[in-house]
Amino acid sequence: MDRKEFLKSLGVLTAGAALLGAEDTLKAAPVTADELDFPLKGLKAKVKEPVKVIIIGAGNRGRTYSGYAANYPDCIQIVGVSDIRESRKNAMGDRFNIPQERRFGDWSEVFKVPKFADAVVISTPDDLHYKPCMKALEMGYNVLLEKPIAQSEKECTDIAAQAHKYGGIVAVCHVLRYSPYFRAMREAVHSGMIGKLISIQHMEPIECRHMAHSYVRGNWRDSDKTTPIILAKSCHDLDIIRWIVDKPCRTIVADGSLTWFKAENAPKGAPKRCTDGCPHEAECPYSAIDVYVRRKQHLGVFDLKNRKDENEIMAKISDPDNVWGRCVYYCDNNQPDHFVSEMVFEDGTTASFSMEAFTPYGGRRTRIMGSTGYIEGDGTTFTLYEFRSNRKLVWDKKLNEIPEYRNSGHGGGDMALVCDFLEAVDSHDESRLTSTIDASVESHVMGFRAEKSRLSSKKVEVNLRRK
Ligand SMILES: NC(=O)c1ccc[n+]([C@@H]2O[C@H](COP(=O)([O-])OP(=O)(O)OC[C@H]3O[C@@H](n4cnc5c(N)ncnc54)[C@H](O)[C@@H]3O)[C@@H](O)[C@H]2O)c1
């Protein structure tokens, strides 16, 4: 008996419960159901020999992916590193015993020597994805490419064309796709547990201080130098929606703006930097002193000697050249702090998405409406309600209790992505990934068109030919 038949039979067996109303359904006791207990993928890649990898951009993300080698040294070997920051280049070089001649500064230096690895990880800033990726493919490397793929629709499609031309695998780091939570949610929809998919509501709460750190003060504050926030932050979400619906997107309409983080909202008498004696420091939720020194959040950008040393952190944010010490109302930012969009897919399925800066939590919130059931998830746990049987099924895997998943960020997605990528490279089989480069480009195009819609106040066609 397959899953659908099994579920149908359950519907018959529990028909008596259908006399209850919708309110009763929502109140029914939750059951951790076997039907949602999809097997967790092991994180140790099945490869014939260690895949040789070069890390280009040894910052936050480069370190994350290279961390896989610490757990599974017989699956991956870090054989080269490139970073314009000597300290980061050498920290990674020393960690993986990379010889001096395989430690490079600018990314372009990597490609001046003959190919010496199976793959490169491109984890440089957003404006340095396109050129290294095009060059890597030309030289026969496979690529683990950080999102966003590139800064324009044309550059994204160029990369897909280059991958096809040279036969290279490009895995885009849409890490959420690889997390057990989203894998299970999609599986529940695709195995028919809520009937026909009708619509999705999805929200990305950024968390107010994360917003201030990355999109007001920090690296992604300027959409022209990086990408519009719908890609820089939310390409994961468009990708997840597209992946769950599994149909081409036809139209998208979007709106939103930068409402709060601008000079006109600065409290009276606030200086340009939080460390210059701001009279509002004690109350301001965005105070750099509070975020970095007291709460010790987002410290990865400072390359500290000792993360507990408050004097060292204070010295960093007091440096007039340090962008993170600035008042959030006096930054050179242009990213919207709220963004809404609506998509219509082939066959009429609809999805709405909102990105919100002003929330006390991060993660994702998702509601999925089907003809016979409903799913509601908070980013770590989801509940599936069956209308007819009145059952309430819960997916609640405690990933931090599963040793190999414990240190894998993005709900387990970071290391699961590396695992799938290594298997895909080893077998030269793109289908080992949940996402081809064409599918990743498609969800990026949705993002570019959403921004076009936001700026033009018009509904925009997406219609892409699916390969
Ligand atoms: N998949 C995700 O969920 C996720 C999360 C965060 C960031 N990202 C993306 O990952 C990428 C890297 O982000 P990050 O947070 O690691 O940034 P980061 O600043 O910590 O790291 C980038 C590194 O690239 C190096 N670099 C800059 N120019 C270079 C050059 N010319 N040649 C070689 N190295 C160079 C920098 O010195 C830095 O160490 C960005 O594109 C970002 O959008 C993805």
Image: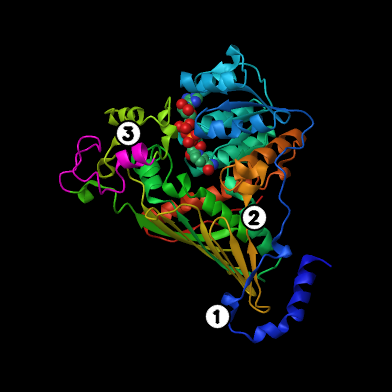
Question: Which region shows up in magenta?
Answer: 268-295
Give me the residue at 64% from left, 44% from top: 405
- Principal secondary structure, stretch drawn in magenta: loop
Nearest to the eye among marks 3 and 1: give it: 1
How far apart are the alpha carbons under marks 3 and 1? 51 Å
Q: Is residue 124 shown in magenta?
A: no
Whether residue 437 is visible, yes or no, is: no
| Mark closer to the chain start, 3 or 1 | 1
Circle 3 packing at 10 Å, graded few (<14), some (14-19), many (20+), is some
Circle 1 packing at 10 Å, graded few (<14), some (14-19), many (20+), is few
Pick whichever, 240 or 416, lies toward us. Answer: 416
How far apart are the alpha carbons under marks 2 and 3? 39 Å
Q: Is residue 278 shown in magenta?
A: yes
Circle 2 packing at 10 Å, graded few (<14), some (14-19), many (20+), is some
| Mark closer to the chain start, 2 or 1 | 1
Residue 163 lies, in percent from the top left, at 64, 36
| Residue on which disc 2 sits | 397
Nearest to the eye among marks 2 and 3: give it: 2
How far apart are the alpha carbons under marks 2 and 1? 26 Å
| Residue on which disc 3 sits | 323
Q: Amino acid at mark 1?
A: Glu
| Residue on which disc 1 sits | 23
Residue 14 lies, in percent from the top left, at 73, 80
Give me the residue at 46% from left, 44% from top: 232
**Mark 3: is the Cβ under 8 angstroms from ligand 1?**
no
Give me the residue at 62% from left, 54% from top: 181
Q: Is residue 213 above or below residue 463?
A: above
Judged from the image, the secondary structure of the residue bearing numbered disc 2 is loop
Residue 313 lies, in percent from the top left, at 35, 31
Q: Is residue 452 above or below residue 366?
A: above
Q: Is residue 56 above or below residue 29?
A: above
| Mark closer to the chain start, 2 or 3 | 3
